[in-house]
Amino acid sequence: GQQLNQSPQSMFIQEGEDVSMNCTSSSIFNTWLWYKQEPGEGPVLLIALYKAGELTSNGRLTAQFGITRKDSFLNISASIPSDVGIYFCAGPTPQGGSEKLVFGKGTKLTVNP
Amino acid sequence: SAVISQKPSRDICQRGTSLTIQCQVDSQVTMMFWYRQQPGQSLTLIATANQGSEATYESGFVIDKFPISRPNLTFSTLTVSNMSPEDSSIYLCSAGAFFGQGTRLTVV
């Protein structure tokens, strides 16, 4: 089935550093979604991307939809302790229209104050 | 956006029993989805809950183990049947790109 390859698997950074993570697929995606999950919570949507080449920001977060439509990255600038969590990329499966999602394995972010 | 509420938020259950998880959306939606997140893992789709028809299950998931109801456009339930410790996971419902807070199930 469709798979999303997300890297890195984990990151340990100092507060104030910038972070970059990415997601790739062997298949074309029409939408890329980036989520953050904190312990005991469900994934929270951070950024949604709908067009190849699109660059979208949400505060200190910036995400881009790759022009090949097979990749996306998420950047976090000037990290703070509350950025800690697991970040997932996701995209709709071809059979599922726009709502049935496949997820990457996640990037676990630790921020040292 | 949609606000999605799940209950219970967590439960500890005896093996061999069943647990029904409820999911309420604050607006009418055509499709709702149920995911499983095993410890330390990513999310895996269990099934699509369609109003007025049977749920559609993904490979590896069957109706006898995970029966789903979808009585209207704002509500769905997932039952985890005849539970074993391997069923210990977080179960999440979603509508569109939005998720409930999850139900953390521990089977002992």
Image: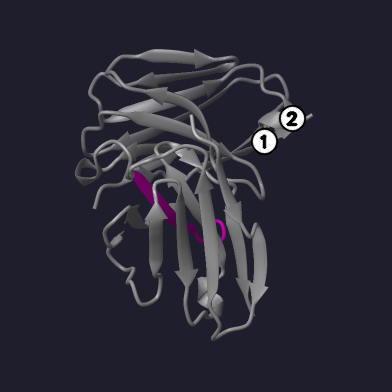
> In percent of the image, x 27 and y 64: which residue is there?
B59
Front-most of residues B82 and A105? B82
Q: Do tag 2 and tag 1 residues touch (Cβ < 8 Å)?
A: yes
The chain containing the residue under callout 1 comes to A
Q: Residue at horizontal 41%, vertical 25%?
A: A48
In the rendered image, the residue lying farthest to the bottom is B16
- Magenta span: chief secondary structure: strand
Number of other residues with Cα within 10 Å of mark 2, as a class: few under 14, some 14 to 19, many 20 or more: some
Residue B74 located left or right of residue A52: right
**Foreground of the two, A103 or B18:** B18
Front-most of residues B4 and A28: B4
**Furthest-right residue in this view:** A113
Q: Nearer the viewer, residue A100 or B88?
A: A100
Rendering coords of residue B53 (x, y %): 26, 59
User: Residue B56 location in percent, x, y?
Assistant: 27, 59
Left or right: where B102 falls relative to A113: left
Residue A64 lies, in percent from the top left, at 39, 19
What span is in magenta?
B31-40
Q: Is residue B32 magenta?
A: yes
Residue denoted by label 2: A81
Q: Residue at x 50, y 14 (%)?
A: A57
> Does residue A93 belong to the magenta stretch?
no
In 3D space, how far apart are the residues under numbered discs 2 and 1 (Cα atoms)? Answer: 6 Å
Task: Kindly identify which residue carries mark 1.
Answer: A84
Q: How is the image coloured?
A: one colour
* In this view, B34 is above or below A92: below
The chain that hosts pointer 2 is: A
User: What amino acid is labelled 2 in the image?
Assistant: Pro
Query: Counting other residues with Cα less than 10 Å from the Cα at mark 1, is it few (<14), some (14-19), or many (20 or more)?
Result: some
